[in-house]
Image: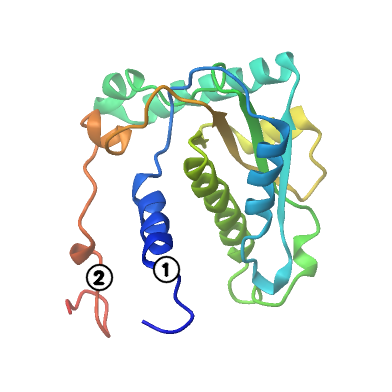
Amino acid sequence: MTEHAYSDAERAALYRVIAERRDMRHFSGGSVAPALLARLLEAAHQAPSVGLMQPWRFIRITRGDLREAIHGLVEEERVRTAEALGERSDAFMKLKVEGIRDCAELLVAALMDGREAHVFGRRTLPQMDLASLACAIQNLWLAARAEGLGMGWVSLFEPAALGELLGLPPGSQAVAVLCLGPVERFYAAPMLALEGWRQPRPLEELLYQDQWGERP
């Protein structure tokens, strides 16, 4: 512990929100106050980014026809994913994979165009722009959970089709459809674990020391 550490209560709150964050699929409608939405997006905007490039762009979807069109793109990919899963296709089709029609707010997170001009931190790892956007999404997720709102990250869509729908410029890319809003309750565990799709692995199975595969 150092003099820069937060108080016991503040640290407990931080670890709690990390542990209780859930990828939500069930929403109860309602609304998100403009000031609260602005606060959440500001939290996202405070994420770290390689070379301070801030590659994230958020598009708030307010038109009902766009929301429905996005739902259609996700449904198309859901069917294709089921086909690709083979023997698990039926089990997959029973899963609820999005809450696009039910959430209070719908956002699309995208990578900006012109990223090739940003070399700092990306010369050998160009995918760090995506890592930076993921950090912004995680900030938004944790802040939403702390505010009592659910959020779900939907990745079942064809990026080019979503980009065309939303008028993204060449070189940019849609990465996530984010469902945000009030929920009746948060899942006690990750939904895929509760549904028996897959169980999370303990940290000790994923932690190595000095060399790949060597356990501490």
Residue 33, image x, y percentages: 67, 30
146, 62: nearer the viewer: 146
Reading the chain from its start, which is encountered first: label 2 or label 1?
1
| Lateral position of residue 207 relative to residue 70, left or right | left
Q: Which mark is residue 45?
A: none
Residue under circle 2?
Answer: 207
Residue drawn at the location 54% of the way across and 47% of the way down = 143
Q: Answer with the quarter of the image where residue 176 lies.
A: top right
Residue 120 appears in the rendering: yes
Query: Is the C terminus in the top left, top right, bottom left or bottom right quadrant?
Result: bottom left
Within 10 Å of disc 2 (Cα), the crowding (few <14, some 14-19, many 20+) is: few
| Lateral position of residue 14 relative to residue 131, left or right | left
Residue 197 appears in the rendering: no
Residue drawn at the location 60% of the way across and 54% of the way down = 136
- Amino acid found under the numbered disc labelled 1: Ser
Q: Secondary structure at mark 2?
A: loop
Query: Is the N terminus in the top left, top right, bottom left or bottom right quadrant?
Result: bottom left
Residue 87, image x, y percentages: 24, 26
Gap in angstroms between the C-alphas marked 2 and 1: 29 Å
Closest to the camera, between mark 2 and mark 1, is 1
Residue 63, image x, y percentages: 76, 19
- Amino acid found under the numbered disc labelled 2: Leu
In this rendering, the answer to whether 206 lies above or below 51 is: above
Q: Which mark is residue 7?
A: 1
Q: Answer with the quarter of the image where residue 49 lies.
A: bottom right
Residue 51, image x, y percentages: 70, 74
In this rendering, the answer to whether 147 lies above or below 101 is: below
Within 10 Å of disc 1 (Cα), the crowding (few <14, some 14-19, many 20+) is: few
| Lateral position of residue 89 relative to residue 110, left or right | left
